[in-house]
Amino acid sequence: MKPTRETDHAIVDVLDVVLREGAMVQADVLISVADVPLVGINLRAAVAGMTTMREYGFFENWDLEHRRVTEDRRSEFGRRPDPRTPIADDQSE
């Protein structure tokens, strides 16, 4: 019997679900030497697409700020300035 490979792309399906639905990862790490605890780490991570994160209220302010900065950069580089914006004179004596 020859091994067969399924034509389904499982990793793509998993990634699609994680980005659409989100996943929460939690881990507790305790580093000890000779039964003496030295370092304790509590990790929590939320992994999801930006749309899902915004639906749950995560990164909403970051997303709005990021969009504003990106728009400011676009207006500085490569686009014509808005004709309604007054031009400031930099003639200081």
Image: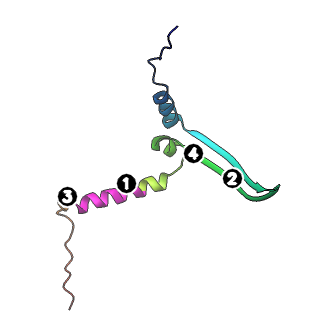
Marks 2 and 4, how far apart at CA: 14 Å
Establish if 84 lies above or below 63.
below
Q: Which mark is residue 78?
A: 3
Mark 1 or mark 2, which is nearer the start of the sequence?
2
Mark 4 or mark 3, which is nearer the start of the sequence?
4
Q: Amino acid at mark 3?
A: Gly
What quarter of the picture does the C terminus occupy? bottom left
Marks 2 and 1, how far apart at CA: 32 Å
x then y, percent, for residue 1: 52, 7
The answer to whether residue 49 is left or right of residue 72 is: right
Question: What kind of secondary structure does the magenta stretch mostly adopt?
Answer: helix
The answer to whether residue 46 is left or right of residue 68 is: right
Q: Which mark is residue 26?
A: none
Mark 3 or mark 2, which is nearer the start of the sequence?
2
Q: Amino acid at mark 1?
A: Arg
Crowding at mark 2 (Cα within 10 Å: few <14, some 14-19, many 20+): few
Callout count: 4
> Residue beneath label 2, please?
42
Q: Which residues are magenta?
A: 65-79
Marks 1 and 4, how far apart at CA: 21 Å
Q: Which mark is residue 67?
A: 1
Query: Mark 2 against mark 1, which lies toward the viewer?
Result: 2
Query: Mark 1 against mark 3, which lies toward the viewer?
Result: 3
Q: Is residue 75 magenta?
A: yes
Image color mode: rainbow
